[in-house]
Image: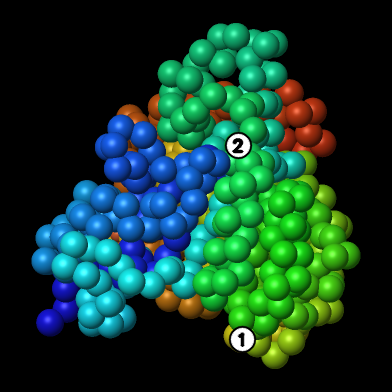
Amino acid sequence: MMSKSFCDLPFEENYIHPNGKMRLCCTTIQDLPTDNNYNLFDASKHSIDEYWNSNRMKEIRRKMIAGEKVRDCERCHRQEEHGVQSLRKTTDMEQHIKETAADGTYSKPATAMQLQMGNICNLKCKMCSQMYSHMHGLETLEIGKEDPDWLHWVKEQGANVNNWTNELGIRQEWYKNNKTKLKMFEHISKNIKHLCVIGGEPTLIPEFYELFDYCDQQDTLGDKIVTLNTNLTNTNPRLTRWLPKLGEWKIWASVDGVGDRTEYIRYPSKWDKILESLEFYRSMLRPNDGIVLSPAIQLLNIDQLDDIVKWWKDWCGGELNHQFGFTWLATVWYPLICNPNIAPREWRLRVADKLSKYKFDKKYDQIIKELRRDQHTIDKSKKLQKAFIKYNDKQDQFRKVQKTWRDLLPELELSLTKSLG
Ligand code: SF4
């Protein structure tokens, strides 16, 4: 019988958040507590071995095996209740149960890892936050020095305009502790087959290259399937030495539009550099490797979704396949001003009509369907529309961008003006 509470991940995956906290996976927002139930596991202080069979991990496994739901997995359960597919996975449930002792100790180390290497990033993307980009936080602080009222307003607005959850401008660099870093490298080299590296921007972080170098010296690169999430603003010639030695690799390319649109959303990236980086990776592709375009669909690019797919297919040589893919992450919901559904209805319907003239896949159709559905009340939409204008006008002015959101999306500007009277 299909379990409603079990998930493979606490038996096979390690997850490190950008601030070094350890969690079950990328979906949960619960950090794992240490055995004193007071502190939290933190990669800058604790090793993977310390948390893997900790009291909380053992309790979670015991509960899952007994068919009880755990609070860390609330989000998956909620999604399933709403008929949405969650990340919960049960493919290896029987095997995992066999390999778990009665107290919840799992006899093997994890074989997969999602490693979020801090928050050092060179970009300040519209939908991002301090947790994933220290530059994003620094900029918010800088604007606040010029205009304290604006900063106060941003803080008050919370997740409406900026997912600001911790101290702005702080660099999260948990991997700077040599002792725990080396233990982590040893663990990855020895045990991890599927490694997904995210940042910040990993290619800017020296320890990311140290990890490859370490595995190369241990001769374990060939055992690994590596997914690298990158904003493509930076490549490093050393990758040409390591990528061909990996079992397989995939680049998840964070590009949110064509030309000046992605430059605007992923400020201050440059389109020419993105194209150059894509070619860099294409030149090393082997039959099982791949490049997957991974845009964050939002209000600032949804009208261009058909053009994004067409451009990508063109770049890939016509058709998508296992080497050249397109991945749909969920449409951006937070910050709410990035959510396409806050736009006036007539604009959304016009965009939906434009997009539906092009045929792609089911998820694309789903996004068009969602665009046609009213998801916020008119009052809430209007409040968020005003916040969208205030936030982006201020950022555009501070950044002195060549093209503002008003230049890039004149029809949206017109529609918002009408909507707000
Ligand atoms: S059920 Fe969901 S939240 Fe829980 S471990 Fe699995 S994927 Fe993560």
When the figure is inspected, residue 27 is found, relative to residue 289, above or below; the finding is above
Q: Quadrant of ligand 1?
A: bottom left
Crowding at mark 1 (Cα within 10 Å: few <14, some 14-19, many 20+): few
In the rendering, which numbered label is found on residue 321?
Answer: 1
Q: Nearer the viewer, mark 2 or mark 1?
A: 2
- Given the image, on which type of amino acid does mark 1 rest? Asn
Is residue 241 toward the left or the right of residue 202 in the image?
Answer: right
Residue at 54% over, 24% down: 167
In percent of width and height, residue 84 lies at 28, 64
- Asked where in the image residue 186 lies, by quadrant, the reply is bottom right
Residue at 56% over, 9% down: 149
Number of numbered discs: 2
Is residue 117 toward the left or the right of residue 206 in the image?
Answer: left
In the image, 40 versus 69, the foreground residue is 40
* Label 2: which secondary element: loop
In percent of width and height, residue 189 lies at 61, 69
Residue at 51% over, 13% down: 152
Q: Is mark 2 within 8 Å of ligand 1?
A: no
Residue at 49% over, 51% down: 47
Instruction: Tell me the colour scheme of the image.
Output: rainbow
Q: Is residue 330 visible?
A: no
In percent of width and height, residue 372 lies at 38, 56
In the image, 167 versus 186, the foreground residue is 186
**Alpha carbons under labels 2 and 1: distance apart:** 37 Å
In percent of width and height, residue 126 lies at 60, 40
* Label 1: which secondary element: loop
Outermost bottom residue? 287
Instruction: Identify residue for label 2.
Output: 172
